[in-house]
Image (cartoon, rainbow, N blue to C red):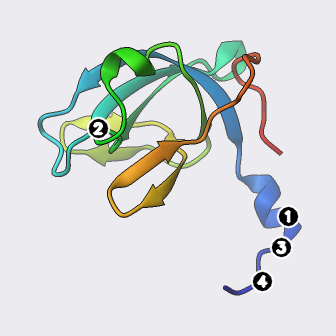
Amino acid sequence: MENNLQWQDFEKVEMRIGTIIEVNDFPQARKPAFQLTIDFGTEIGIRKSSAQITKRYRKRELTGKQIVAVVNFPKKQIGNFMSECLVLGSVNEDDIVLLSSDLKVENGLRIG
């Protein structure tokens, strides 16, 4: 691992807390995934994301869950779906565990 990241680089990444408000299957994805609709509060609003988290999570347990996502990446077209943020998680091959807040907090709070 190289230690070449500058503090100014880290400050550019906007990681925010959001609450998943809707989860849908994404059968058009190459790898099994869900389409998530996430509420990031009044400043950022509602964003959508595709997440390959079907191995560990079921739709019903994701609704209402607060997660961490990067909200200032460019949008990315994934099949017929436009992903507007990047949901973060720890990755072990195809098993992903979402990063989340252990306490309920206000949507849109910045991670720093």
Closer to the camera, 19 or 100?
Answer: 100
**Callout 4: helix, strand or loop?**
loop
Residue sticking out furthest to the bottom: 2
Closer to the camera, 91 or 48?
Answer: 91
Q: Horizontal placement of 80 versus 20: left or right?
A: left
Q: What numbered label is drawn on residue 71?
A: none
In the picture of the structure, the residue carrying the numbered disc 2 is 54
Q: Horizontal placement of 52 versus 98: left or right?
A: left
Disc 2 to disc 4, C-alpha distance? 33 Å
How would you rate the neighbour count of disc 3 (Cα within 10 Å): few for under 14, some for 14-19, many for 20 or more? few
The image quadrant that residue 103 belongs to is top right
- Residue 11 horizontal/vertical position (percent): 82, 55
For marks 2 and 4, give the one nearer the viewer: 2
Disc 4 to disc 1, C-alpha distance? 14 Å
The image quadrant that residue 105 belongs to is top right
Q: What numbered label is drawn on residue 3?
A: 4
What amino acid is at disc 2?
Thr
What amino acid is at disc 4?
Asn
Quadrant location of the N terminus in the rendered image: bottom right
